[in-house]
Structures are given as structure tokens and as C-alpha cells.
Amino acid sequence: MDFKTIRFAVDERVATITLNRPERLNACSLEMAGEMLMALDHLGDARVLVLTGEGRAFCSGADLAASGERPVTGAQGSYMALTEKYNPLMMKLARLDVPVVCAVNGPAAGIGCSIALAGDFVIAGGSAYFLQAFVNIGLVPDGGASWMLPRLVGKARATEMMMLGEKIGAEKAYEWGMIYKAVADESLAGEVETLAARLANGPTVSYATMRKNILTALENSYAQALLAEAEGQRTAASTEDAREGGMAFLQKRKPAFKGC
């Protein structure tokens, strides 16, 4: 596939989407959101997804007036951009059957913050920061931020991020429990590669069921979460990986998962 705003590759069962508008700090245009959606439909045999940005930013936010596109203006235009492009992207990421690793290299602002925090594992370099700056221009957070942030860091800190509109650095984000890990910039690529390789060799059906159950638990009651776990366990227990895991445990060896 020939993309203009992202790079997409699958190698060793690791799919990588790189936001590729470095001259705009990878601002997410409608075209970029559409290309990301298309890439997510073509993961093939990938067993993990890595999201990152080219250059010195992860994503500086939405770009509703990108060159070559009809500018999106006004309240109704913003609503349509969210409901037709950005929101479907966030839902697609949430419902993937593979783990998502986000490598945050520099700013993750606005919709870029939401995309970054959609990862199951968010690893941020030392120069990274997370920003909900909508209040500074009289708008409100979007891309699922008002659902996601209180669940990640609690109401008080989510309110701080959204109402004060200040940068949250990588170390602070880690201390808050917002992200999986904060590392030096020069260590980011290696940390992500190691984690992605580990996940790519793990029990894929189990991972997919865990992602679904976590989302179910966040949205529904304790009783519904218990039922989802029971149903998920039935699915996972019927896989070759579960049989291999059981045999490996009995034989005191490392399991060789096939992803099925």
C-alpha cells in the first residue's frame, strides 16, 4: 500500500505504523487518520502493533486544514471529523486482537495524546510529554481522553490535565501510572523492540481475550466482567497455545507459542 502520511511495515510478526509528517510534528490530518484505519485492516500475520512518530514528535494533535484537503471549519465540521475519522480510529485501536505498543518520542498532544495512551504498553522517551491543551483555545478534550484519563490517573489528575492544559513529562506520567515506562531517548527504540519481540512470540489469542476483557471491565459491572472472563477462558483454553503452555509447565521448559 502506498501511504502519504504514514509508513507501514510488518516484519517478524511485528507491525509498525510510523506517523510520517515530521515537518508538522506528525499532526494527525484526516488523511493520516484514514491511512491509519486502512493499515489496521491489513495487519496480516502480525502479532503485535507498534505505533510511533517520525522525527522529534509522536503527534502534535489534529490537523483539520492539511494541505491538499478541504479545510474543516466550524463546530459541525469538527463534529464530523471526530465522528467520521478520529473516533473510528480510536475504536479500531481499542478492539484490535493484538497488543499495541506506543513508542512516544516527543510531544503527544490533543488527539496525539489519546492515540499514544491507547497503547497497552506506552513507553516514553525522556523528551516526551503528554498534553491536553484544548482549554487554552476554549475547546474540550476529544479522542476518548475524557473517558481514558480518569481511568488511568484518577479524577483529580485528569481534571488537572484537562482544565490547566499543562505538559506532563515522561517521568511524571510514569509516576502517575499513566504509562508503562519512561526511558532515556537513546534507549527508546531498543526498549520497544525488545518488548515487541516478546509480545510477538506470546499467546496471541490469550492477549486478544485479555484486551477484550479489560475493555469490558472498564465499561461494565463486576458481574459482567466475571462472565466475560469465563467466556474468555473457554476460548483461550481451546487453543494450541494453552495446550503448549500446560505441557511446558509440566515439563519445566519455556513454552513455544504459535499464536493460535
Image (spheres, rainbow, N blue to C red):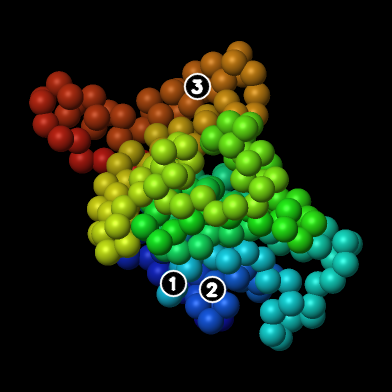
Q: Position of residue 66 (x, y in %)?
A: 69, 79
Quadrant of the rendered image containing residue 249: top left
Q: Position of residue 34 (x, y in %)?
A: 64, 68
Q: Position of residue 160 (x, y in %)?
A: 63, 41
Q: Position of residue 45 (x, y in %)?
A: 39, 57
Q: Tell me the CA gap for discs 1 and 2.
A: 7 Å
Label at residue 255: none
Residue drawn at (54%, 16%) of the image: 226
The outermost residue toward the left is 252
The mark that comes first in sequence, 2 or 3, is 2
Residue highlighted by disc 2: 25
Query: Circle 3: is it few (<14), some (14-19), or many (20+) Cα within 10 Å?
Result: some
Residue highlighted by disc 1: 56
Whether label 1 touches label 3, CB < 8 Å: no
Q: Amino acid at mark 1?
A: Arg
Element class at badge 3? helix
Residue drawn at (11%, 25%) of the image: 251
Residue highlighted by disc 3: 229
Whether label 1 touches label 2, CB < 8 Å: yes
Q: Amino acid at mark 2?
A: Leu
Q: Is residue 28 above or below residue 234?
A: below
The mark that comes first in sequence, 1 or 3, is 1
Q: Amino acid at mark 3?
A: Glu
Whether label 2 touches label 3, CB < 8 Å: no
The mark that comes first in sequence, 1 or 2, is 2
Q: Tell me the CA gap for discs 2 and 3.
A: 41 Å
Q: Tell me the CA gap for discs 1 and 3.
A: 41 Å
Element class at badge 2? loop
